[in-house]
Amino acid sequence: MPTPNVVSEIIDGELIVLDLVAGRYHATDGVGAVIWRLVTDGVDEASAIAALTEQWPSEPVAESVRAFLDTLVEGGLLIPATYSEGAPQSVSLAETPWSVPQLNSYDDLADMIQLDPIHDVADSGWPTANPTRT
């Protein structure tokens, strides 16, 4: 499951993951986006590997999925969790060509992401007045 500080969206087959604390954003497409969708929909690693292996039987699916999931966990984007078995109906594999999933990470917007005032909302709401001003 995604860590609490992560938001994500799949747009036209490309996954964008934003880490609101670190200020980094990440992107992947194709098989990487499919893997993200599967695990965030609650599919366990073994079932994801089985579904992807069925789609691409001659590809190194198991090694690629495990390596990609390790990258996501090490990057603080996913928390290892106990998942239920089974593949969701919402993920279409037929339109996705095989490629080894790669995660591209960027920090060029970190300063702007971390300065977002929405992250610093007080209980009284935003914006809050500076108490030293009169």
Image (cartoon, grey):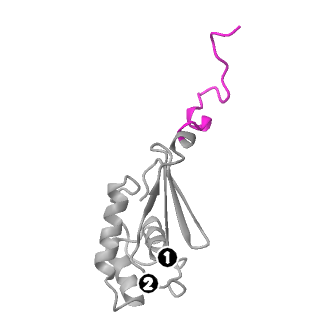
Q: What element carries label 2?
A: loop
The residue beneath circle 1 is 30
Residue 49 x %, y %: 34, 79
> Is residue 102 in sight in this rendering?
yes
In the picture, the quarter occupied by the C terminus is: top right
Which range of residues does the magenta coloring cover?
A: 114-134
Q: Which of 95 and 110 is in front in this view?
A: 110
Residues at circles 2 and 1 in contact by the CB criterion of under 8 Å: yes
The residue beneath circle 2 is 98
Crowd class of label 2 (few under 14; some 14 to 19; many from 20; radius 10 Å): some
Residue 118 x %, y %: 61, 37
Q: Nearer the viewer, residue 120 or 27?
A: 27
Q: Which residue occupies the extreme bottom position in the image?
A: 58
Q: Which residue occupies the extreme top position in the image?
A: 134
- Indicate whether residue 45 is drawn in magenta: no
Q: Which residue occupies the extreme left position in the image?
A: 63
The kind of residue on which mark 1 rests is: Gly
Separation of residues labelled 2 and 1 (CA atoms): 7 Å
The kind of residue on which mark 2 rests is: Trp
In the picture, the quarter occupied by the N terminus is: bottom left
Q: Nearer the viewer, residue 123 or 9?
A: 9
Residue in the image at 39% along x and 57% along y: 78
Image-based side of 30 in relation to 126, left or right: left
Using the image, determine if residue 25 lies above or below residue 46.
above
